[in-house]
Image (cartoon, rainbow, N blue to C red):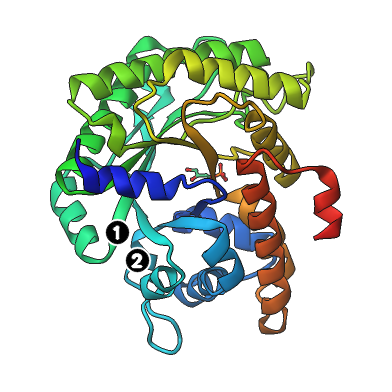
């Protein structure tokens, strides 16, 4: 076993801590800034992210690592400090998104394949020198009447495995993120369908990781929770979501994997926290289970900030509160009263 990779993976999922996904592409962060009527520029992206990374209470106590976008890993603060240095000073790890996005699958425009393998070996070496100790690659699976097909699942799983092998060769821990979407236009599937497809996807991913000789002790899995599609009328209780999520993971994820860090996927802040906490009330989980949220960690903060300098402190408080609530959830100790009494 590669001890260095295992140590980093263990740090990423250390009990009480989780990962901040701040790796939105420029197109995605533009959508977030549109909500607050803020022009998306290199500078506004830098100001926003610097505000998050300088939230020292959150960063030191609740955030084990931050996933960055290529622009951010090279960026300096207004005062000339690398943003990566700010992150590392709070004892948090630097991560980097290395896929170049989900593109239409050739001859099948209804599904996607994630791209970014060309030149990845060289890019990973460069990212390591820029401070990255873990990376992220997101495969996207959408459920609809005829999809996903086994071909699309396998193609995405193989890409994840090839990416993971290149990461481990470069001494970088790969976050393996096969996301079964809950919030696309077509997401009217029920919870059982999400469970069936996620089980299929995870089984395929671990088969491909095995074929690629991946050391499971040196990865972190980033799955979706088992949850009904956004437009499904049959809603499910938080307990059912937690039970089905755990049961799916126990069926598919080998115990050698050090940790599981969920994406939030379009759940609102409180839902994501509540589900994570219930999952962690089960005492015999074989892995550390935590968060690697984007929207569910940042939403309140971005809305509070609104692009205004005078709102930075309040926005940092909002981010710290959410990070703290998710820290409780990673220990199975969150309850709704904590939301108001923090
Ligand atoms: P969300 O938590 O907003 O789903 O983002 C997590 C992520 O990193 C998606 O790739």
Task: Please state which of the two labelled residues, at mark 2 or mark 1, is closer to the viewer.
Answer: 1
Query: Where residue 152 appears, x then y in whole percent?
Result: 36, 19
Mark 2 and mark 1 lie on one chain; the one further toward the N terminus is: 2
Residue 20 on image: x %, y %: 51, 54
Q: Which mark is residue 132?
A: 1
Q: Quarter-wise, where is residue 264 in the image?
A: top right
Measuring 38% from the left and 44% from the top, which residue is drawn there? Answer: 10
Q: Say how many tags the image has.
A: 2
Q: Residue furthest front?
A: 283
The front one of 48 and 288 is 288
In the rendered structure, the answer to whether residue 36 lies left or right of residue 70 reads right
Above or below: residue 208 compared with residue 12: above
Q: In which quadrant will I find the N terminus?
A: top left
Q: Which mark is residue 73?
A: 2
Q: Left or right: where does residue 83 sit relative to residue 187?
A: left
Residue 94: tell me if it is visible.
yes
The residue shown at (57%, 57%) is: 62
Which class describes the residues within 10 Å of circle 1: few (<14), some (14-19), or many (20+)?
many
């Amino acid at each position: 076993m590669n001890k260095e990779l295992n140590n980093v993976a263990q740090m990423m999922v250390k009990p009480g801590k989780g990962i901040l996904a701040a790796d939105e592409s420029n197109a995605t962060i533009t959508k977030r800034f549109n909500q607050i009527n803020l022009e998306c520029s290199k500078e506004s992206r830098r100001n926003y992210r610097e505000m998050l990374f300088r939230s020292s209470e959150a960063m030191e106590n609740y955030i084990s690592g931050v996933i960055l976008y290529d622009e951010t890993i090279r960026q300096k603060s207004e005062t000339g400090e690398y943003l990566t240095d700010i992150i590392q000073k709070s004892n948090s790890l630097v991560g980097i998104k290395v896929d170049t996005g989900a593109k239409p699958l050739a001859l099948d425009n209804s599904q996607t394949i994630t791209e970014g393998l060309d030149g990845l070996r060289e890019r990973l070496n460069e990212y390591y020198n820029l401070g990255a100790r873990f990376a992220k690659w997101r495969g996207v699976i959408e459920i609809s009447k005829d999809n996903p097909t086994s071909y699309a699942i396998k193609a995405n799983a193989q890409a994840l495995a090839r990416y993971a092998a290149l990461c481990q060769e470069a001494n970088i821990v790969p976050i393996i993120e096969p996301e079964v979407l809950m919030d696309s236009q077509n997401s009217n599937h029920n919870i059982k369908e999400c469970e069936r497809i996620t089980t299929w996807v995870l089984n395929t991913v671990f088969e491909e990781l095995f074929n690629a000789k991946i050391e499971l002790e040196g990865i972190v899995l980033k799955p979706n929770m088992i949850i009904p599609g956004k437009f499904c009328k049959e809603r499910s209780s938080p307990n059912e979501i937690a039970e089905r999520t755990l049961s799916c993971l126990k069926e598919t994820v080998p115990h050698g994997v050090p940790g599981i860090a969920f994406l939030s996927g379009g759940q609102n802040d409180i839902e994501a926290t509540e589900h994570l906490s219930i999952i962690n009330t089960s005492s015999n989980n074989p892995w550390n289970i935590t968060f690697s949220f984007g929207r569910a960690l940042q939403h309140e903060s971005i809305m509070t900030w609104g692009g205004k300098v005078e709102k930075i402190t309040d926005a940092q408080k909002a981010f710290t509160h959410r990070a703290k609530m998710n820290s409780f959830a990673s220990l199975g100790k969150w309850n709704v009263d904590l939301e108001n009494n923090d």
